[in-house]
Image (cartoon, rainbow, N blue to C red):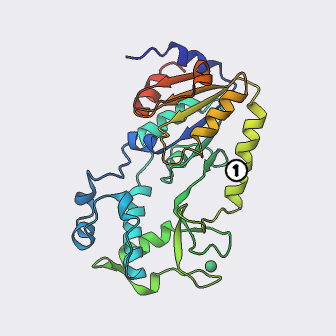
Amino acid sequence: MKDYSKIKEVICNADAIIIGAGAGLSTSAGINYGTADFAKNFPELVQKYQMTDMYTSSFYEFKTEEERWSYWAKHINYLYNIPATNVYKNLYELVKNKEYFIITTNVDGQFLKAGFAKEKVFEVQGSLSKMQCSVGCHQKLYDVLPLVQEMLHNEKDCKISSDLVPYCPRCGEKMEINLRKDAFFVEDAHWHKLHDEYERFIQENKNKKLVLLELGVGFNTPSIIRFPFESITSKYEHVTLIRVNDKYLEIAFEIQNKSILVKEDCGEFIKQSLSFV
Ligand SMILES: [Zn+2]
């Protein structure tokens, strides 16, 4: 049992909270990119392509668009359609009455499903619910979820029906899921609006009692949340960093006294913290 008294004091007295969420938060919520259930959920993908998990399978080089979209329809249907999990719902309860803002590298849409306001959730790396032109010829995103359902209903032997394969309405190129993986990642008007909101939120609160609550952020893309959070903590006197991570707790010496390091599963941390707000 950890001592949560300091955490309680910091969270209860905060003027504003920025939540920075990484893969560890969704893992804690049971959204599993790993191998555990893959063979059970997708036996046909294991048999046909020898795939082993949600993450590495997303880099598979398919021979046809019909096969590629059959795969993505299953991938999206499985991950994106998981309803709001208790971990995210508890997190919402924890901050809903505070001034908050979210920045996340997760693409599973859990924040929005759990009730967080759309204009306060910056999904930096994209979303499984959107698609874009594969060569980024124009900065617009398209909903993919209705198409996914149609694909699943018109799918056989790991191929969707050819007439459902989407192509870019402007240049005719292939379409891609809106996930940052190359230089063609599309940042649409909504992305830019949230980016600006995030910057504005920091500027507005940097000299107040601002808490940076970092949940499950490792070293996959540390330049998006982890390093900027450390930098803000070091620059502004009243900022406190709470770093929750069951593996990567390292912190720079000069901000040690402004940081609370919690070696804990994110879901457990949120549950404990919820008991005192
Ligand atoms: Zn295009």
For this rendering, which residue is in front, 256 or 212? 256
SS for tag 1? helix
Relative to 93, residue 154 above or below: below
Q: Quadrant of the C terminus?
A: top right
Q: Position of residue 265 (x, y in %)?
A: 40, 32
Ligand 1, image quadrant it occupies: bottom right
Residue projecting furthest to the front: 253
Q: Position of residue 208 (x, y in %)?
A: 74, 24
Query: Residue at (46%, 82%) from the top-left corner?
Result: 164
Query: Residue at (46%, 25%) from the top-left corner?
Result: 262
For label 1, being within 8 Å of ligand 1 is answered: no
Relative to 3, residue 145 above or below: below
Q: Quadrant of residue 125?
A: bottom right
Q: Quadrant of the N terminus?
A: top left
Q: Quadrant of residue 10?
A: top right
For this rendering, which residue is in front, 175 or 277? 175
Q: Quadrant of residue 209?
A: top right
Relative to 237, residue 48 above or below: below
Q: Is residue 274 visible from the viewing direction of this image?
A: no
Q: Amino acid at mark 1?
A: His
The residue to which callout 1 is attached is 195
Q: Position of residue 201 (x, y in %)?
A: 73, 38
Horizontal relation, residue 251 to residue 70: left or right: right
